Amino acid sequence: MKILTLADEESKSLWDYFEKSKLDGVDLIISCGDLAPQYLSFLATFTHAPVLYVHGNHDDCYEQTPPEGCICIEDKIYNYKGIRILGLGGSMRYRDGVHQYTQGAMNRRVSRLWPKLAYSRGFDILVSHAPAYGFNDGEDLPHTGFQAFNRLMDKYKPAYFIHGHVHANYGGNFKRNSVYGDTTVINAYERYLVDYEDIEKTE
């Protein structure tokens, strides 16, 4: 299964210079936040693949203009062809904003999901905007990761953790692929294609 992951910056290749063939073979599109809703709606128009999304810290406009034809997976476990996808968007709270949380607030979000997690027997992909705490996150408050994500990976050992928020031009903190325990961690900045089955076979 090919999953196109997106975050933080609209890809000129997919928007300004779009060709429908660029989405050939893509089974699922996942947005990790901070993208124009019109961009996601545009992609949804040209593919039969579901377009899933969580919110970034700059996505307050989604309250009035949600991406049309797309599926919000915030605080949900979305099952796609047997793959369980958990969505937890937002960033560390550093100012007033709809999609910003303290460590405690994110912990409470996760604790409310325990019944769903128990029913689904865990999950296969964690999708967020922010990274995990102390793992490829930033030293400044806005880009600090969430401790709750570390605990989720420790407990459920998902195949993937896909996030954004840390941009490629931030320097040494940007890592496209990393490994946390049994989990492959992917920074989806701009766009990145994941072959789910290939990675599964190597585990």
Image (cartoon, rainbow, N blue to C red):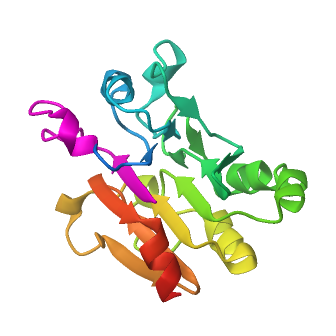
**Percent position (x, y) of residue 86?**
65, 53
Q: Is residue 14 in the magenta section? A: yes
For the residue pair 52 and 48, the one nearer the viewer reads as: 48
Residue beneath the point at 58% across and 85% down: 182
Is there any visible trace of residue 153 in the rendered image? yes
Residue beneath the point at 20% across and 40% down: 21
Residue beneath the point at 48% across and 55% down: 130
**Percent position (x, y) of residue 24?**
28, 45
**Percent position (x, y) of residue 65?**
46, 14
Give the left or right position of residue 9, taking residue 3 as reference: left
Residue 38's place in the image compared with 15, above or below, is above
Give the left or right position of residue 86, taking residue 175 as reference: right
Residue 146's place in the image compared with 54, above or below, is below
Tell me which corner region of the image, top left, top right, bottom left or bottom right, holds residue 136.
bottom left
Q: How many marks?
A: 0
Q: Is residue 188 in the magenta section? A: no
For the residue pair 155 and 77, the one nearer the viewer reads as: 77
Give the left or right position of residue 42, taking residue 148 as reference: left
**Residue range highlighted in magenta:** 1-23
